[in-house]
Amino acid sequence: MKELFPYFKCFESASRHMNFTKAAEELNISQSAVSQQMRTLTRRLHFPLFRKQSNKLLLTYEGDRLSKVVSKAIYEIENEISLLSVHDSIGDLRIGVDPSFAIGWLLPKLDRFEARLMDSQVMLNGNNHRLRVSNDKEDDGVDISIQILTTAPEIVSFYEIPNDDFIAICSPELLYRGASEMSIKEFRNESLLTLSPHGVNAAYSMDCMVWSESAEVGGIPARDHEQYSSLEMLMQAVVHCRGIAIIRQSLADDHLRANRVVRALPHAVRCTDSYYVTWMENSQNIKHIREFIEWFSVEFEPSSMDS
């Protein structure tokens, strides 16, 4: 059957135009060559593809069914080749990203990805998550969006960040000398640091009582309670020994790696909503988008998060 593949392009053109002469012009071959290929294909398939009615060329039942399959296959092949062959992208890779995720996870690692781009830069936008719907350079949408969603998006392509947990963090100075974590008693005797439950803050943190019950910790920090309006302020309070916070591990990743904060307890509760990376497969920047998704998925492997 593979030897028939060269004939299918000719068949697709002839069945689309319903005219051998127009197919010959499109394929830059002679009309007799088109006729010969269709005769050969018909003979090898053992069923007719075309029929004539009042000097009008029509598809047979078999030809009509085959035409639909062949046309779809050729379109998908040509489209994929076009996307893979894009070398001159529309410019810099524009990423709409939640600012706290950018600060806590993406920015500290971004130079490693930019080194792979060579000819382009990454432009981050904390306010715009609208994906570009056209390849028009005037379209101010982004190529990639990274944001917290409760369900997987429809229509667009997406990558769900795996294994993000709510964890308890504190300054390493709060741990007893040489200890890798707190005792439950020490945990209860510390101050609780929380975010004001407004807007996206609700997805950054988790109610400590709910976390404690889910993780079976058996208590919460009860010495004092401080509330902060932004994640950045909360993280600075943790770094400066103000107490303990329950936070998404991904948002504390950079501080954990730099040992500015540590896990107060080994307990963790899986996040019910996820960070999703979304993009449009028909983007002219698909080459850079796929490079980013490949890099991103490797960087976010559970082993990388825990190291």
Image (cartoon, grey):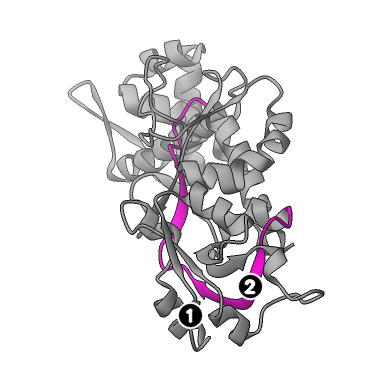
Question: Can residue 269 be found in the magenta stretch?
Answer: yes
Position of 83 relative to 275 (above/below): above
Q: Nearer the viewer, residue 154 or 95?
A: 95
- Along the polypeptide, which appears first: circle 2 or circle 1? 1
Q: Is residue 1 visible?
A: no
Residue 264: mark in rendering: 2
- Residue occupying the far front of the picture: 223
Mark 2 neighbour class, 10 Å CA radius: few under 14, some 14 to 19, many 20 or more: many
Q: CA distance from mark 2 to mark 1?
A: 12 Å
Location of the C terminus by quadrant is bottom right
Residue labelled with disc 1:
220
Total count of labels:
2
Q: Position of residue 117 (x, y in %)?
A: 68, 28
Residue at image location 56% in from the left, 61% down from the top:
242
Q: Report whether 133 appears left or right of 81.
A: left
Residue at image location 44% in from the left, 74% down from the top:
208
Position of 143 relative to 151 (above/below): above
Q: Secondary structure at mark 2?
A: strand
Q: Position of residue 230 (x, y in %)?
A: 43, 49
Residue 130: mark in rendering: none
- The span picked out in magenta is 258-285
* Type of amino acid under label 2: Ala
* Type of amino acid under label 1: Ile
